[in-house]
Each structure stands twice: as C-alpha cells, then as structure tokens.
Amino acid sequence: MKARFDTVCNLDEPTSWPKGFEKWNPMVLFRISLYLGACIIGLLSFSNSLFDPHTMTITFTIGLLGVWRYGWWFTHAV
C-alpha cells in the first residue's frame, strides 16, 4: 500500500486546520456527548466521600493549597 503524502494536512500550519462543520461534524458531536454521558453516569453512580466528616478537613486543606498555588500563578501571569 503506497502512502499519499500530497493529501496529508500540515498540522503546523494553522490555515489548514478544519473549521466549522468540517471540524464539528455530527460524528464528533455524538462521540463528545457519549463521553460526557458516560462521565455523568459514572459520577452519579459512585458514592461521594469528599464531604464525609472524616475526610472534609483534608479536602478543604488541599483545596486551600490549590487556591493559594493558582493564586500565585495568576499574580505572576498578570
């Protein structure tokens, strides 16, 4: 089987990227919605232990550390 290099898009060239309906065709939208549906079903079917009284302190501690870290990142980015 011979490869055809003349029809391959150059991914480094932004003008050759697909746009509009060429990029978001119905099959792509179906796959995205299927993935999001599977994620929602997974989130609803597993029990939530983040707000359990035994783990609430560590959840808030990690959350506060994340806010502090990304707050510094935002300060440096600005």
Image (cartoon, rainbow, N blue to C red):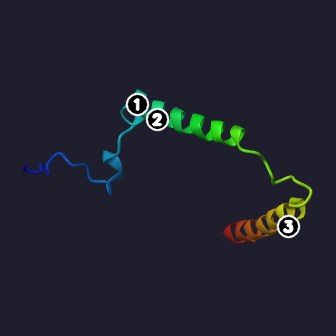
Three-letter code for the amino acid on which mark 3 is drawn? Thr
Q: The residue tagged with tag 2: helix, strand or loop? A: helix
Q: Nearer the viewer, residue 40 or 3?
A: 40
**Residue 72, percent from left and from top:** 75, 71
Residue neighbourhood size for the residue with mark 1, other residues' Cα within 10 Å, grouped as few (<14), some (14–19), many (≥20) = few
Q: The residue tagged with tag 3: helix, strand or loop? A: helix
**Residue 70, percent from left and from top:** 73, 66
Dots 2, 3 in contact, CB < 8 A: no
Outermost left residue: 2
Q: CA distance from mark 2 to mark 3?
A: 36 Å
Three-letter code for the amino acid on which mark 2 is drawn? Arg
**Residue 17, percent from left and from top:** 35, 45
At horizontal 47% and vertical 32% (from top left) the residue drawn is 29
Dots 1, 2 in contact, CB < 8 A: yes
Q: Which residue in the protein does label 1 denote?
A: 27
Q: Which residue in the protein does label 2 denote?
A: 31
Q: Which residue in the protein does label 3 denote?
A: 61
Q: CA distance from mark 1 to mark 2?
A: 6 Å
At horizontal 71% and vertical 44% (from top left) the residue drawn is 46
**Residue 7, percent from left and from top:** 17, 45
Q: Is residue 70 above or below residue 29?
A: below
Quadrant containing the C terminus in the rendered view: bottom right
At horizontal 69% and vertical 42% (from top left) the residue drawn is 43
At horizontal 36% and vertical 51% (from top left) the residue drawn is 14
Residue neighbourhood size for the residue with mark 3, other residues' Cα within 10 Å, grouped as few (<14), some (14–19), many (≥20) = few
Three-letter code for the amino acid on which mark 1 is drawn? Met
Q: Is residue 74 above or below residue 30?
A: below
